[in-house]
Amino acid sequence: MSFDPIPYDLLDAFKHFLSVFGSTMLIAIIVCFIVGVLTRGLKGVADVFSGILDFFVQMIHVSCRRVWSLSVLTIREALRQKILFVFIIFAVLFMFAGWFLAGAADRPDLQVQSYIDFVLKAISWLVIPIMLLLACWSLPEDIRLRTIHTVVTKPVYRIEIVMGRMLGFTLLGTAILVVMGGVGYIWINRQVPESAQYKLVSKVPVYGAISFTDREGASTAAGINVGDIWMYRSYIEGATKARAVYKFKGIDESDAINDKLVLQSSFEAFRTHKGNMGAGGILYQFIFVNDDKNLRVPSRPLINKEYSDNVLEINRKLKDDNAEGGTGAELDIFTDLVDKEGNLTVEVQCLEAGQLLGMARPDLFIRTPDHAFLSGYSKAVFGIWLPMVIVIMLGVTISCFVKGPVAILTTLTIVMVGFMSKEYMNELLSGQMQAAGAIEAWYRLITHMNSQTALPDGPVKVIIGIVDGGIINFLWLCQQIIPNFGIYSNMREYVIKGFDVSWDAALLPGIITAAAYILPCLIVSFYSLKLRELEAK
């Protein structure tokens, strides 16, 4: 995998949510107070307090029965709009997909990946746009046709209307997603030939922390930089004391497969000379280290095969000719090489002089017993369900204060930015990109000042700093409000590469991200629908 599955910090995420949500709500309340005082004086302050309390009063008195009735009504309206025609498009795609995907790759693993990728993308590109259109168009259309009057004249709260819409579209989208996911799973199993069925697994990796030593054996922060633009891997020099040291935590006997420790690697070679190309790759070696017992047990020399899985199965009982117990002393990996804290240290050494071996943290892992393919596939489908729910909440929320076409364009823009521009915004706001603020850039352009020259001291510099700082803070707030849909595409990558979807690195952040938008969407929807004249077209 070309991504690093880093465990999610739930506490930091909660603090971040509070800071963003709190600052946004504080700004909104201050603006409401200012508008209230300017328009109605002290009575405006009382109106603002009353409006704030009204949301909590309605939330306390929400009736599950009324919300469910509104959800059923929403589903019936969507079915009358021929939403189920989406299954026809889905069926047509699968009828002819086999013709174009068969033989698309020479290697069986790549062929399986193309099938899985097609199914998950087809489901996501059909379900999410359909639910976006429904969520954005439904409420404005009811207001335009005045059919909303049959609801608002009943003893129904505004917040219940919003919750009913969100729940109804979510249930409908869930049903469509379950059917498509089930058909896709059957299609994948039927398309993959018997010779490649072994690729339909969900590998469960255990990743470790990585550190490096230089050619003299001294600890260093990173390996050698070979000039690659993609700074993903660091390289170790061959036939020296340079090592990449992996430390795996919490290793025990349950991680063994048939009494064997399975290591899987995907290192990258950098050759300074041609070498022995007939061997098929660069030679390297694993060294198992237990500093508590002063043990260093090397594996046999291995050949690094690039662009394919390098799997090493090590018997639980192995011989150590260098152990203090004497020649051929037998060691148990889980009792002798795993230290008292449950950590297993593995050093990687390149054996060929003049050659370098590159690696990152995910390039070596311990492969524990595999899960069924259905496990990872169902989690990937769940990874489509979560952004679908976010899109529904955003669509319903935006449609509460604008008309259907505007709501569709606004929601679509947010989704596209969340999918494509999140990384660019992170680089821009983190200072990684060497760019001045907007006002400073205009000032330099007008005065023909290059970017290396410092701004002259004076009131102009102070004003430019204040204005650019405000713009950056505003962009930061916008960047935090826009959902990060990129975390959900990672779930698909896990399954495509044959891995089970990680709970800490993928599922948990996806669930927390979707849950974080529930309360803000309800608040914005409630006040938008409350202030809107439902009688207006």
Image (cartoon, helix red, strand yellow):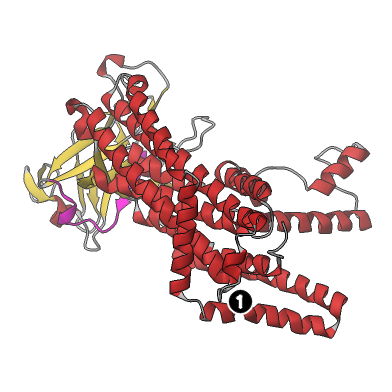
Q: Is residue 479 above or below residue 280?
A: below
Q: Which quarter of the figure has residue 202?
A: top left
- Image height check: is 331 above or below 401? above
Q: How many marks?
A: 1
* Residue 96 percent across, percent down from the top left: 36, 24
Q: Quadrant of residue 451 in the image?
A: top right
In the structure shown, which secondary structural element does the residue marked by tag 1 occupy? helix
Observer-nearest residue: 238 or 493? 493
Please state the horizontal and vertical placement of residue 300, each as a whole percent of the image. 18, 34
Residue 2 shows in this picture: no
Pick the front one: 133 or 388: 133
- Residue 232 in picture, x, y percent from top left: 47, 38
In the image, residue 289 above or below residue 284? below
The residue beneath circle 1 is: 55
Q: In this rendering, would 380 be left or right of 329?
A: right
The span picked out in magenta is 242-257
Report whether 97 appears left or right of 342.
right
Residue at 50% x, 64% y: name it: 164
For label 1, the crowd category at 10 Å Cα-Cα, with few meaning under 14, some 14 to 19 and many 20 or more, is: some
Residue 246 lies in magenta, yes or no?
A: yes
Q: Is residue 448 magenta?
A: no
- Indicate the quadrant containing the N terminus: top left, top right, bottom left or bottom right: top left
> Which residue is at 68% across, 52% downward?
403
Q: Residue at x 35, y 33 (%)?
A: 267
Residue at 43% over, 51% down: 173
Quarter of the figure with residue 409 = top right
Q: Quadrant of the C terminus?
A: bottom right
**Residue type (three-letter) at the residue carrying disc 1:** Phe
Residue 5 in the figure: left or right of residue 318: right
Does residue 380 appear in this view?
Answer: yes
